[in-house]
Image (cartoon, rainbow, N blue to C red):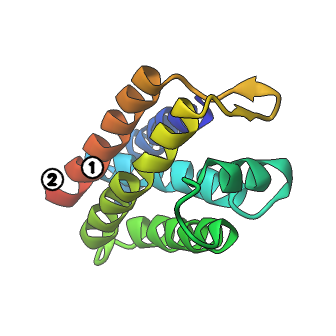
Amino acid sequence: MAPLIALIVGTALARIAGLAGVSALDGWHPALRVGLAVMFTLTAVAHFVGQRRADLIAMVPPRLPRPNLLVTVTGVLELVGAVGLLVPATARVAAAGLGLLMLAMFPANVSAARRRLTLAGRPVTPLAQRTALQIVFVATAAAISFGP
């Protein structure tokens, strides 16, 4: 739920800044870019620190090799994508890449739900709820990639 909150709050604050006169944020499209960048910065940090990193490693489907490396690589890609969203010249490509990355990582969510993992002392997000969230996140990336 934290990524959704980050997306909503980041977008809302960016849009308010645009309405207050920050011309670079004047409009929903730039505000969405900021919100998605905030979300991916939040999720990327989890790939590198503490218990959350261990939880993400545990989510990697068992058939995939070197889960610790996969978590590190996806975290780096999320950070690079977040920065790319903030640069108007690269925002569309970054959004498309992040959308594809989310689709590529979704099987880990399915695997975790099917294996009924417990992360940070709580059961993983149920698959239906996780799917709905992923649709929102991918749709946001698509809106940025194909928007004005």
Q: Position of residue 95 (x, y in %)?
A: 31, 61
Location of residue 127 (image quadrant): top left
Whole-Å distance between the Cαs marked 2 and 1? 7 Å
Q: For residue 125, which quarter of the picture?
A: top right
Q: Are marks 2 and 1 in contact (CB under 8 Å)?
A: yes
Q: Which mark is residue 29?
A: 1
Residue type at mark 2? Gly
- Where disc 2 sits, the SS reads loop
| Labels 2, 1: front one | 2
Q: Residue at x 26, y 72 (%)?
A: 93
Q: Which residue is mark 2?
A: 147
Residue depicted at 28% across the width and 78% down the height: 89
Residue positioned most to the right:
50
Q: Residues within 10 Å of mark 1 (few under 14, many from 20)?
A: some
Q: Nearer the viewer, residue 86 or 125?
A: 125
Extreme residue toward the front, this view: 63
Q: Amino acid at mark 1?
A: His
> How far across and how far down the image is residue 25, in percent?
38, 53
Q: Is residue 122 left or right of residue 69?
A: right
Which quadrant would the C terminus be assigned to in this image? Answer: bottom left
Give the label on residue 110, or none. none
Mark 2 Cα shell of 10 Å, populated few (<14), some (14-19), many (≥20): few
